Image: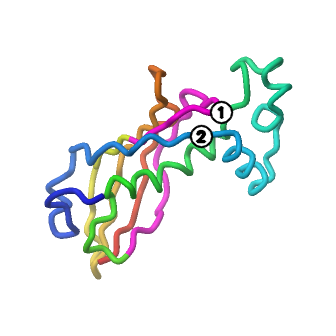
Amino acid sequence: MSIKGYSIATIGNFVGRELGVSDWLVVDQARIDEFAKCTGDSQWIHVDVERAEKESPFGGTVAHGQLTLALLAPLAIEIGLIPDDASAGLNYGLDKVRFATPVKAGARVRNRVTLMSTVVKGNGRVLVKTMNELQIEGEDKPAVVAETLVMLVA
């Protein structure tokens, strides 16, 4: 998706504005299991469905916090964070991250992205800071609230 009028040249005009909201994405048990395999984090609360249904305070398995954090980038790209005239958008880091609510297996999430600031770095590069709120369908509190940094390259 692209954002009307949004480019490397005009990005400063969008500071303080919501860039958009992604489509809903299901965080199913298969995705949680794959993340556990990839990272080696196989804690029972994430991967043992039967035990989690009996012992977890959430009534079932929940996604890893790091998995929910990892979803921010592709969902922000879906919205159009990287303008069409950029050759790349590189992860530059995080300024603040809070895991407010666990994401239960099978829940749907989406990312609401607001542009916080831009800094022109020269050589066609712009450092972009966004506020990301990973919302959970049917929940009052978000799963994750994070300030992310992306280096856009013209």
Q: Nearer the viewer, residue 4 or 122?
A: 4
| Quadrant in which residue 100 is drawn | top right
Q: Could you classify mark 2 by the number of other residues whose Cα lies within 10 Å: few (under 14), some (14-19), or many (20 or more)?
A: many
- Where's residue 46, x and y in %? 75, 36
The answer to whether 132 appears left or right of 12 in the picture is right
Magenta stretch, residue numbers: 88-111
* Residue at 73% from the left image edge and 24% from the top image edge: 60
* Residue at 27% from the left image edge and 53% from the top image edge: 117
* Residue at 15% from the left image edge and 64% from the top image edge: 10
- Assess whether residue 21 is covered by the magenta stretch: no
- Where's residue 2, x and y in %? 26, 60
Label 1 secondary element: loop
- Where's residue 4, x and y in %? 16, 57
Residue underneath mark 1: 105
In this view, 33 is above or below 49: below
Indicate the amino acid at tag 1: Ala
Color style of the picture: rainbow
- Dot 1 and dot 2 residues touching (CB under 8 Å): yes
In this view, 57 is above or below 122: above
- Where's residue 17, x and y in %? 21, 44
Badge 1 or badge 2: first in the primary sequence: 2
